[in-house]
Amino acid sequence: MAKERFEESLKRLEDIVNRMEKGELPLDESVKLFEEGIKLTRSLAKQLEEAERRVEILVKGDAGGAKIVPFEPEEGE
């Protein structure tokens, strides 16, 4: 699967979920969509993890300057 943009992958996953929730698909098509959904979920999770690692918060330093600190999520997030 080519690396798709996050938004496109998320939209595709939403479409898959909506189709499967209707319950009108044959079993084989449901299984194929489920497999695609799992792949998309993993890809989206990986993209989010990569983005989180790149996020840096600009914090005002002691001397009035600025310093970059890595993003650290709070407990439970």
Image (spheres, rainbow, N blue to C red):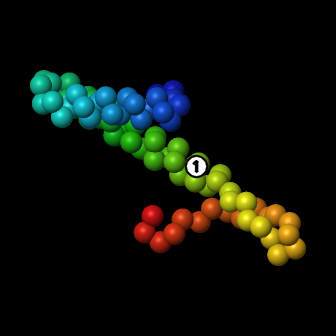
- Residue 44 at x, y = what percent? 46, 42
- Residue 34 at x, y = what percent? 26, 35
How many numbered tags mark residues here? 1
Relative height, residue 4 to residue 71 (above, below)? above
From this viewpoint, which residue is outermost toward the bottom?
A: 62
Q: Which residue is mark 1?
A: 50
Quadrant in the picture for the C terminus:
bottom left
Residue drawn at 15 percent across, 24 percent down: 25
From this viewpoint, which residue is outermost toward the front?
A: 64
Q: Nearer the viewer, residue 39 or 15?
A: 15
Relative height, residue 50 to residue 65 (above, below)? above
Q: Nearer the viewer, residue 36 or 61?
A: 61
Side (left or right) of 56 relative to 45: right
Side (left or right) of 66 relative to 74: right
Residue drawn at 54 percent across, 65 percent down: 73
Residue drawn at 26 percent across, 34 percent down: 17
Q: Nearer the viewer, residue 2 or 23?
A: 23
- Residue 56 at x, y = what percent? 68, 57
- Residue 26 at x, y = what percent? 13, 24
Tag 1: residue type?
Glu
Side (left or right) of 63 relative to 7: right
**Quadrant of residue 61 within the rendered picture:** bottom right
Crowd around label 1: few <14 · some 14–19 · many ≥20 (10 Å): few
Instruction: Give the structural element (helix, strand or loop) at label 1.
Output: helix
Residue drawn at 44 percent across, 32 percent down: 9
**Quadrant of residue 42 within the rendered picture:** top left
